[in-house]
Image: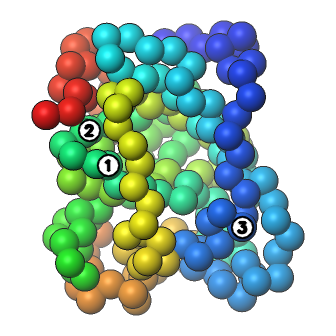
Amino acid sequence: MGIKLIDIMKKPDIRFLNDAKNVLYDQKWAKKAPNLELYYMYRGIKEKNGLRYDITIIPPKMLGEEFIKTKGHEHCRKYQELYTVLQGKAIYLIQKLKNDSIQDVFAVKAKKGESVIIPSGYGHITINPSNKELKTANWTDKKCKGIYERLEKKQGACYFYTKIGWIKNKNYKKIPALRFEKSLKSIPEDLNFLKGQ
């Protein structure tokens, strides 16, 4: 799906470092760093059949020892979400949290044109693991709201992606081994499965 420049001329919501400091691995770096612009969210670029289309642009950057990422969120109710990489490379870290333990966690590597479905009941973050800009789009039910509190309380997802690889977040009681799932090579034609139950 081609995105014209006019599609993202609207003003983005900007996520600053101060908005995401408490979910970072390298807290020593975060305490001293200026309040940088981390990434840009263009929400509601278009709507179709009750679904909302957003674009997020994540420049290449290191947050101390950790690769730049989104703050991360979970979904209310039974909503799912479909992400597609428009430019660059992404790693989507997807986890299911119950009480203090992770029931399931997996990551999906995706490049331009590839997609990933975030299942209902899962939280997720998007990582830019490269030295190039990442542009990613998502479709979700327009009534779907992101829930940030549990990831904030745990100081991030259960794994951090750093210069030396994946590091477990010690704020979780139980973390399964990280597995990798394959990306989708094309977008499903029928997106009705994204609607809330």
Q: What type is the residue that disc 3 sits on?
A: Asn
Which of discs 2 and 1 lies nearer the camera? The answer is: 1
Q: Left or right of 78: which side holds 94? A: right
State whether residue 159 appears in this view.
no
Tag 1 or tag 2, which sits nearer the N-term?
1
Mark 3 to mark 2: distance in Å?
A: 28 Å
Q: Is residue 195 left or right of residue 32?
A: left
Q: Where is residue 19 in the image (x, y as percent from the top left)?
A: 65, 63
Mark 3 or 2: in front is: 3
- Residue wearing tag 3: 18
Badge 3 marks a residue whose secondary structure is: helix
Above/below status of 11 relative to 63: above
> Taking 48 as reference, is 186 above or below it?
below
* Label 2: which secondary element: loop
**Residue 14: percent from the left, percent from the top?**
71, 45
Other-residue count near label 2 (Cα within 10 Å), few / some / many at <14 / 14–19 / ≥20: many
Q: Quadrant of residue 50?
A: top left
Q: What residue is at 13 percent from the left and 34 percent from the top?
A: 197
| The label number, if any, that marks residue 80 in the structure image | 2
Left or right: residue 191 compared with residue 171? left
Q: In this view, does 158 lie to the left or right of 21?
A: left
Q: Which amino acid is tagged 2?
A: Gln
- Residue at 54 percent across and 59 percent down: it is 71
Q: Can residue 7 be seen in this view?
A: yes
Q: Which residue is at a point 28% across and 48% down the rendered structure image?
A: 76
Q: Quadrant of residue 178?
A: bottom left
* First-in-chain label (3 vs 2): 3
3D distance between C-alphas at marks 3 and 1: 23 Å
Q: Residue at x 65, y 72 (%)?
A: 21
Q: Which mark is residue 75?
A: 1
Q: Measured from the top left, where is residue 159 in percent x and y?
A: 41, 73
Amino acid carrying label 1: it is His
